[in-house]
């Protein structure tokens, strides 16, 4: 039999215990959360109203290491901690960016 995913109480603030990932994924999640909280969420309403994201934001993404983070350095990428990133890193990236709930 296949074991079930262990669920935690929904009142704890976590709907499901994370059963995949490693320490790099935890650090990437914290990094992306901080980036989204500090650089995306404060400006997203203005960007939506303006219908564009300012060019300077792309420089900010490079500074934070989130621009082209899934590409290797030799291709101009900025992988987190200089190491190859996997699909869980990609999921975490979108998980955090989607907290802005926007199409901008």
Image: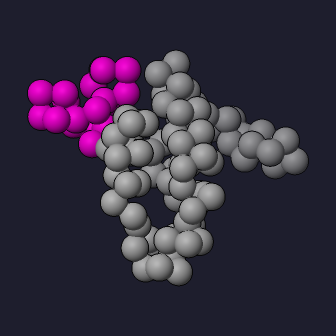
Is residue 90 visible to the viewer in this orientation of the structure? no
Quarter of the image for residue 9 reads top right
Q: Residue at x 56, y 72 (%)?
A: 46
- As for residue 49 lying within the magenta part, the answer is no
Question: The C terminus appears in which quarter of the rendering?
Answer: bottom left
Q: Pick the residue in front: 6 or 53.
A: 53
Q: Residue at x 16, y 35 (%)?
A: 76
| Residue 80 spot, x, y in % from top left | 37, 27
Residue at 58% across, 32% down: 30
Q: What secondary structure characterizes most of the magenta part?
A: loop
Horizontal placement of 60 versus 44: left or right?
Answer: left
Q: How many marks?
A: 0
Q: Quadrant of residue 63?
A: top left
Left or right relative to 52: residue 39: right
Front residue (pair 69, 39): 39
Range covered by the magenta-colored residues: 68-85
Q: Residue 74: within the magenta? A: yes
Q: Residue furthest left?
A: 74
Question: Where in the figure is residue 94, as x and y percent of width and height?
Answer: 45, 51
Is residue 38 toward the left or the right of residue 28 in the image?
A: right
Place of residue 45 in the rendered image (x, y in percent of width and height, measured from the top left): 59, 71
Q: Residue at x 87, y 47 (%)?
A: 11
Q: Where does residue 95 sit, x and y in percent of width and height?
A: 52, 50
Residue 64 appears in the rendering: yes
Quadrant of the rendered structure where residue 84 is? top left
Q: Nearer the viewer, residue 53 or 11?
A: 53
Dividing the image into 4 quarters, which one contains the N terminus? top right
């Amino acid at each position: 039999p296949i074991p079930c995913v262990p669920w935690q109480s929904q009142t704890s603030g976590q709907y499901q215990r994370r059963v995949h990932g490693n320490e790099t994924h935890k650090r990437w999640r914290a990094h992306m959360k901080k980036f989204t909280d500090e650089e995306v969420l404060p400006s997203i309403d203005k960007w939506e109203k303006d219908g564009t994201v300012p060019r300077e934001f792309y420089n900010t993404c490079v500074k934070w290491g989130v621009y082209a983070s899934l590409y290797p350095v030799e291709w101009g990428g900025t992988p987190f901690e200089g190491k190859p990133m996997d699909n869980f890193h990609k999921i975490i990236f979108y998980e955090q960016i989607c907290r802005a709930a926007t199409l901008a």
